[in-house]
Structure formats: C-alpha cells, structure tokens
C-alpha cells in the first residue's frame, strides 16, 4: 500500500467520523407494554421446603391466578445450602397498579388465611 493510498483511506475515515458528529442521534428505549415481573425468594423453615412446595402447588398458585397474577416459573436452587430451604418464583402483572391491587386482594382473601 502506498503512502498516498493510505492517506486517502485515512482522510475518508476521518471525514466520515467527523460528519457523524454533526448529527444529534438520540437513542431511547420504550417498553411496548406496562407489564411488571416480580422475582420473589421464599426461605422456608428448616425441613419445611417440601411442605412449602406442596402448598404452592396445591393452593397458592391457584390463588395468584384468581387475583390476576400470572405464574411464570418456580425454581429450587440445586446447590447446598439453598437447595434445602429456598423457593424462587416469578410472577407477571399487567402493570404496577395491577400488582398492588392483586396483592391487596390476595392478602384479603379468606382462602389465603387457611
């Protein structure tokens, strides 16, 4: 490559770089919905994780749905010591307001108190 060719390539690069600086490019991101995802961690008392899992499976998940919450996923860690007492779950709400209303209704539900 000759010096002249290298100079032309450099001039083209610099002019392109500088011309891009003359424009105001504003990047913004907007959510396409107001959905809210809530990641929750529940720590059970020692030896009570099987009971907690059964309660969620047989009772709590249905109540969440009843009050407008969507059950997205439930996980138990694989590694000790958390695998013995930890439940991690993800709920979906249509909005922050809906989440607040769902939790208020859930807590007031007589079925939850049982």
Image (cartoon, rainbow, N blue to C red):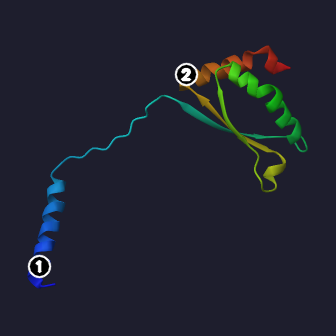
114 w.r.t. 20: above or below: above
**Callout 2: 10 Å neighbours few (<14), some, many (20+)?**
few
Q: Is residue 95 above or below residue 87?
A: above
Residue 74 image point, x, y percent: 72, 39
69 sits to left or right of 3: right
Looking at the rendered image, the quarter that the C terminus falls into is top right
Badge number at residue 91: none
Circle nearer the N terminus (1, 2): 1
**Measured from the top left, where is residue 32 in percent x and y?**
43, 32
Front residue of this view, candidates 43 and 18: 18
To which quarter of the image does residue 14 belong? bottom left
Q: Is residue 23 left or right of residue 80?
A: left
- Name the outermost residue toward the left: 4
**Quick one: which residue is furthest to the bottom in this view?**
2
Query: Callout 1: helix, strand or loop?
Result: helix
- Is residue 41 depicted above or below 12 in this figure? above
Residue depicted at 77% across the width and 53% down the height = 78
| C-alpha distance separating marks 1 and 2 | 63 Å
Residue at the image position 88 percent from the left and 36 percent from the top:
51
* Number of marks: 2
Question: What quarter of the picture does the N terminus occupy?
Answer: bottom left
Query: Is 110 above or below relative to 37?
Result: above
Cβ atoms at labels 1 and 2 below 8 Å apart: no
Q: Which residue is mark 2?
A: 97
Image coordinates of residue 11 in percent, x first then y, are: 11, 70
Of tags 1 and 2, which is closer to the observer?
Answer: 1
Task: Identify the residue under disc 1.
Answer: 5
Tag 2 secondary structure:
helix
Q: Is residue 72 left or right of residue 42?
A: left
Camera-nearest residue between 12 and 46: 12
- Mark 1 Cα shell of 10 Å, populated few (<14), some (14-19), many (≥20): few
Q: In the image, what residue occupies the spot 69% across and 23% down?
A: 65
């Amino acid at each position: 490559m000759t010096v002249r060719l290298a100079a032309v390539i450099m001039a083209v690069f610099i002019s392109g770089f500088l011309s891009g600086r003359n424009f105001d490019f504003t990047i913004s991101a907007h959510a396409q919905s107001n959905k809210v995802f809530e990641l929750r961690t529940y720590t059970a008392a020692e030896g009570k994780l099987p009971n907690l899992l059964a309660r969620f499976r047989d009772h709590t998940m249905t109540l969440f749905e009843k009050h407008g919450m969507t059950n997205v996923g439930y996980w138990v860690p694989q590694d000790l010591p958390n695998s013995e007492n930890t439940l991690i779950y993800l709920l979906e709400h249509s909005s922050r307001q809906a989440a607040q209303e769902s939790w208020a209704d859930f807590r007031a539900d007589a079925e939850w108190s049982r």
